[in-house]
Image: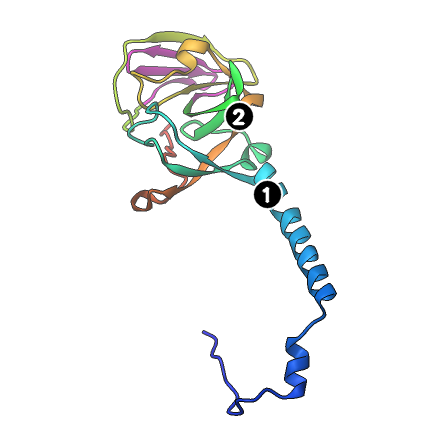
Amino acid sequence: MRTLFFSKNTQPTDQEQKIETAPKEESLWDLIKFAFILIAIIVPFRMFVAQPFIVNGASMDPTFHEGDYLIVDELSYFLREPKRGEVAIFSNPANPSQYFIKRIIGLPGETVSVHGDRVEVKNDKGQLVLEEPYLGSSSNRDRTSTLGQDEYFVMGDNREVSYDSRMWGPLKEEMLKGRAFLRLFPPKVISYLPGNYEFEI
């Protein structure tokens, strides 16, 4: 912790006054330089590294609720492939200006079969029946999809109301925006990698 020391002399010296006073032109130039540096740092960070999002809707209940404030990691998916169980943010395939939040269930090359609440994943390693303790509601919707090498199968945790890959099919990798990295609001649920779930293979 830093400590501030004050001079006993209540009248500032000429030298101190010269240090405190700066030409207006120089102060303005310093302010412009500071603003430029700030913009040069913040804009690329917001565009390519992390960006805030607010959850709207109930498709991810009870993992996320309407109004949750998230910071989305936009860098990881440039460095590695998305993983099963991660909560991803992506462009709505029907309206790219709108963003969805869902959970990654199926990976490229896999076959995903959904029978109500039962989800089976087949790949070259065998077959996996997903245990999903995060589910908020059941559903009677069925679908089987075989994914291409650049496709993912995504679903909301609130299966009864979620509009996801069961309706509109596999998600192209190019539509992925990033993964949920931090939840900052409400304060009582602040968390790192919120909703992330690692399946036991």
Residue found at x 74% / y 64%: 25
Task: Say which element carries label 1.
Answer: helix
Instruction: Check residue 133 in the rendering and tell me which mark sits there, or answer none.
Output: none
The span from disc 2 to disc 1 (Cα, nearest Å) is 18 Å
Say if the magenta span includes residue 128. Answer: yes
Residue placed at 66% from the left, 59% from the top?
A: 31
Q: Is residue 95 above or below residue 29?
A: above
Mark closest to the chain's N terminus, 2 or 1: 1
Give the dominant element type of the magenta stretch: helix, strand or loop: strand
Compared across the picture, whether 26 is left or right of 173 comes to right
- Residue 114 locus on image (x, y percent): 35, 12
Residue 55 in the image: state x and y as whole percent: 39, 31
Residue 197: % across, % down:
37, 32
Residue stretch in magenta: 105-130
Q: Is residue 113 magenta?
A: yes
Image height of 132 relative to 145, above or below:
below
Q: Which residue is denoted by mark 1 in the rendering?
A: 45
- Per the image, the residue denoted by label 2 is 176
Q: Amino acid at mark 1?
A: Phe
Decide: few, some or many residues near mark 1? Use Cα within 10 Å; few <14, some 14-19, many ≥20. some
Q: Quadrant of the N terminus?
A: bottom left
Query: x and y percent of residue 76 in the render?
Result: 54, 36
Q: Nearer the viewer, mark 2 or mark 1?
A: 1
